[in-house]
Amino acid sequence: MVMATISTVSLIIVATVTSNNQVRYAFLTFGAAGIWACSPMTLSCLSNTIYRPAEKRAVSIGVVK
């Protein structure tokens, strides 16, 4: 949840700051890092929650990705 919060705040800053491109790029980097940090945790939780049938799990993982 910490990484998701950092990502959300960073992307809000990117959307609101219009005058300084260096600040926008720095916070865009933090936002992307937060998204990529949350992805493996979401996929592992999904794989453990939906385990049968295998087709249902495969489709749900594909939708999340």
Image (cartoon, rainbow, N blue to C red):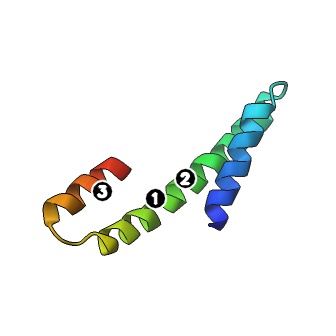
Q: Which residue is mark 1?
A: 39
Q: Earlier in the sequence, mark 1 or mark 3?
A: 1
Location of mark 2 (residue): 35
The residue mark sitting in front, 1 or 3, is 3
Of marks 2 and 3, which one's residue comes earlier in the chain? 2
Question: Disc 2 to disc 1, how far (Cα)?
Answer: 6 Å
Tell me the kind of residue under disc 2. Answer: Ile
Q: Secondary structure at mark 1?
A: helix
Q: CA distance from mark 2 to mark 3?
A: 16 Å
Q: Is residue 44 left or right of residue 7?
A: left
Q: Is residue 47 visible?
A: yes
* Camera-nearest residue between 53 and 26: 53
Residue 38 is situated, as x and y percent measured from the top left of the image, at 52, 61
Q: Position of residue 39 (x, y in %)?
A: 46, 58
Q: Amino acid at mark 3?
A: Ile
Residue 1 place in picture, x, y as percent:
62, 66
| Residue 35, position as x, y percentages in the image | 55, 52
Quick one: label 3, few (<14), some, or many (20+) residues within 10 Å? some
Number of other residues with Cα within 10 Å of mark 2, as a class: few under 14, some 14 to 19, many 20 or more: some
Is residue 29 depicted above or below 5 in this figure?
above
Q: Which amino acid type corresponds to the residue marked 1 in the rendered image?
A: Ser
Which residue appears at 62% of the width and 58% of the height? 4
Eyeballing the image, is 59 above or below 13? below
Residue 6: quadrant of the picture: bottom right
Disc 2 + disc 1, Cβ < 8 Å: yes
Q: Residue at x 14, y 59 (%)?
A: 55
Crowding at dot 1, Cα within 10 Å, few <14 / some 14-19 / many 20+, comes out as few
In the figure, is residue 4 to the left or right of 39?
A: right
Mark on residue 64? none
Determine the residue located farthest toward the right in the rendered image: 19
The label shown at residue 61 is 3
Q: Secondary structure at mark 2?
A: helix
